Amino acid sequence: MPAMLGQSKAFQQMREQLQRYAACDVQVLIEGETGTGKELAAREIHYASARRDRPFVPVNCGALPDNLIENELFGHERGAYTDAKSAQPGLIDHARGGTLFLDEVDSLSSKAQVTLLRFLENNEYRPVGGVARVSNARVVAATNSCLDARVEEGLFRRDLQYRLNALHVRLPSLRERHGDVSILAIHFLAQVGQRLNRPAKRWADDALRMLDTHTWPGNVRELENVVLRAYLAAEDEIIDAAHLSGLIIPISVAVLSTPQDAMFDDGDLHYVSAKQSAMCAFERTYLLGLMKRTSGNITAAARLSGTERRQLGKLLKKHGIATEAFR
C-alpha cells in the first residue's frame, strides 16, 4: 500500500485521527480538496483496522450509471433480466468483510442517493431478481466538495449525509502542511527514477525553495505531476529552479501579475508594506474561493477552512465580501 508521507503538525493530527477511526467500525466521511489523497486516507483506515485482511473495494460514484446503480452495487441473480445468463455479485458483495470506499459520493444522482440510503439504514440489500441479504462491509465515503453546502443547495440528501458522517475527517491541503512539500518532492523524485528505470536525480536548494512557495491548488497530485515533468526536463543529475520555469509560477510573480492584487504601490518597495499587501491579497483571494466553493454558507466555510465562524465573519467584513452574492 502506498504510504502517506508528511511531518507537519496538520498532517500528523490528521494521521492520528485516521488511526483512531480505524478502530471504530462505523461509516467515515472524508472531505478534502482535489489531490489531497482521499483514497490513500481511506486505505489507511482499512489497513489499520481489523478488516485489513479483507477486500478494499474502491468505487467511483461519478461513474455509476443511474439506470444500473442497483445492479452495480447489489449484483443480480441468473435470469433477473434478458442478458443475465449467470449470477453476478455486486460491489457490496466484493467488499464482504472489508471496506467499500465510495469516492466522489457527492456526484450520486437523486435516485442513487435513495438507493444508498436504503442500504445504509440496516445494511440490507437485494440483488436484482434475488432475495434480501445483509452486508457486513464497512462504508467509507469521500468528497472534494463540502456536503453541508451541497445539502443547503438541495443537491444532497441531509439524511444520507447523516448516515455517511458518523465519523468525519478533513484532509489538510498541501499549503496547510508546512514543510511537507520538500519531503514529498524528494520522495516523488526517487519514485520517478525507479519507475522509469533511469538514473536518480536530486533537487537543488533553489528548486526546493521554489516548490515550497507554490500554493499547490492541485495539492499532492499536482506536485507529483510537476516532479515527473521536472525530471524529464532536466538532462543533468541536479534539478534547479530553471527546470521548474513554466511548470509552476512563484507566488510573488502570481500576485504581481494580477493588477488588482498587486503587491506594491507605485515605487513602494518597503518590506513591511509589501508583506502586508501580499497578505491582504492572499486573504481576499482565499475568501472569494472559499465563498464560491461553499455557495456563501459561512458555517460550511468555517468548517472547511478550520476557522471559527465569528472570525471568518470578521474577515469577510474586512474585505467587503457579501455572502449573498454567492448564493
Image: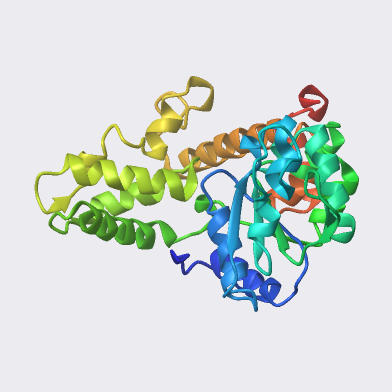
Relative to 183, is 308 above or below? above
Residue 280, compared with residue 73, is above or below; it is: above
In the depicted view, which residue is nearer to us: 75 or 300? 75
| Percent coordinates x, y for residue 154 in the rendering | 86, 32
Is 87 left or right of 190, judged from the image as shown? right
Q: Position of residue 190 (x, y in %)?
A: 25, 60
Colouring: rainbow
Q: How many marks?
A: 0
Q: Is residue 112 left or right of residue 89?
A: right
x, y percent for residue 101: 64, 55
- The residue at the far left in this view is 236
For residue 88, above or below residue 283: below
Can you say which quadrant of the picture contains the N terminus? bottom left
Q: Residue at x 69, y 30 (%)?
A: 292
Q: Inspect this view and state whether residue 161 appears.
A: yes
Task: Say above or below: 119 vs 276.
Answer: below
**Quadrant placement of the C terminus:** top right
Looking at the image, which residue is at 58% across and 62% down? Answer: 56
**Residue 39, percent from left and from top:** 56, 55
Asked whether residue 299 appears in the rendered view, the answer is no
Is 266 positioned to the left or the right of 287 in the image? Answer: left
**Residue at position x 52%, y 27% in the image:** 261
194 or 237, nearer to the observer: 194
**126 lies left or right of 215:** right
Query: Which one is in front, 159 or 288?
Result: 159
